[in-house]
Amino acid sequence: MQSIEPLIRRTHKAATGLRAASDRQIKSALKVLADSLETQKRVLLGANAKDLARQDPDNPRNDRLMLNEERIGSIARSIRKVGRLPDPSGKVLEKRKLKNGLLIEKIAVPLGVVGAIYESRPNVTFDIAALCLRSRNACLLKGSQDAEHTNKAAIGLIRGALKKAGLPPDCVTLLPSQREAVQELFTATRWVDVLIPRGSDSLIRYVRENSRVPVIETGAGVCHVYVEKEADLDKAVAIVVNAKVSRPSVCNSMDTLLVDAAVAPALLRRLQVPFSKYAVEIFADPAARRLLKGYPFLQAAEAGDFAREFLSLKCAVKVVKNMDEALAHIQQYSTRHSEAIVSRNPRQCQRFLAEVDAAAVYTNASTRFTDGEELGLGAEIGISTQKLHARGPFALEKLVTEKWLIRGNGQVR
């Protein structure tokens, strides 16, 4: 594979032109892109079909790769929403005058060049491109080989929209899908300001351990729903089923159900019909396995099952004695992504909110709401589970850093 340094350097140069562009141009590019998604969706669907044809048809992760008319429409709507959001760069964060006469301003500025490494999901190509454009960041996109045809079709639409708006096309660059490309990206400290991995825990760990470019993690999810003894069981069933089956291949889906022993018989009995409908495979601890006897998709849980991000119609179930045991389990196994409690006891809910260390903590709601779009932020690059700079939905307002402007009149120190 040829060196990708020329691509990286062209993107770095294009970032300067993007910072100088008018707000009208950026909004125009996003509108053109959203429109072209709908008018040229057949091109995108054809490319996506080629990628899907190469996969094992029984692989549950194909859901991440698949595009259809509904999903393309959703992507287009999301891009339009991003276009309507205010530009986060250039905002004055602080302004004051010192006693010595210096005028001080702190403003928000783009990060510069954002590199993104991600797996399968072709919608991520559009999400990251749109967010970076709106915040005046150039971006380098390194998708997986699984989505190679789809990503190439996507980048064609994106670059076409940039040209039509008079913006430098190189401010959004698709890197080769081969694994070798990431090695150069890891060492491009002169040209790339931040790397954002989005995907499996193994991908994120690999990027974190090997990159010399600063990394913002968008973490894998091992997400829990805890049904406390004072839960409304109708709500609990609805929340648990939604958290597991609505879209099991995503990081905010439930991986482990923790249920208080006091309500475990009733809850697990009521879950069997809806879980059977979706053929949810349950990996149960001994207490849960006894209560679920006769459930057709039942397995004995091993210790490692409680640390798994299933990303499929599978989950672990554990019966706990009380809140203390539930919290201890979450502390041991959580990846600090999304955690939920179902309870009518406000004190227990408040304790859960206060003590659980995660990017998103819920009471009486599904973990599936951990999403930039759902939380009113527009599209997102991912869900950050780290604590520096960004945590939770990594959306538009986090794609900037700070810059100090100091205006003087001959002052010396």
Image (cartoon, helix red, strand yellow):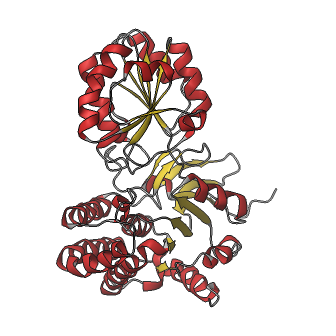
- Whether residue 195 is visible here, answered yes or no, is yes
Q: Is residue 276 above or below residue 69?
A: above
148 and 370: which is toward the camera: 148
User: Percent position (x, y) of residue 298?
Assistant: 40, 33
The quadrant of the image that shows the N terminus is bottom right
Q: Say left or right for 131 vs 356.
A: left
Q: Say left or right for 175 vs 371.
A: right
- Whether residue 168 is visible here, answered yes or no, is no
Residue 111 location, quadrant: bottom right
Residue 364 location, quadrant: top left
280 and 143: which is toward the camera: 280
User: Percent position (x, y) of residue 173?
Assistant: 48, 80
User: Percent position (x, y) of residue 219?
Assistant: 54, 49
Residue 278 location, quadrant: top left
User: Percent position (x, y) of residue 185?
Assistant: 64, 74
Q: Is residue 323 above or below residue 133?
A: above
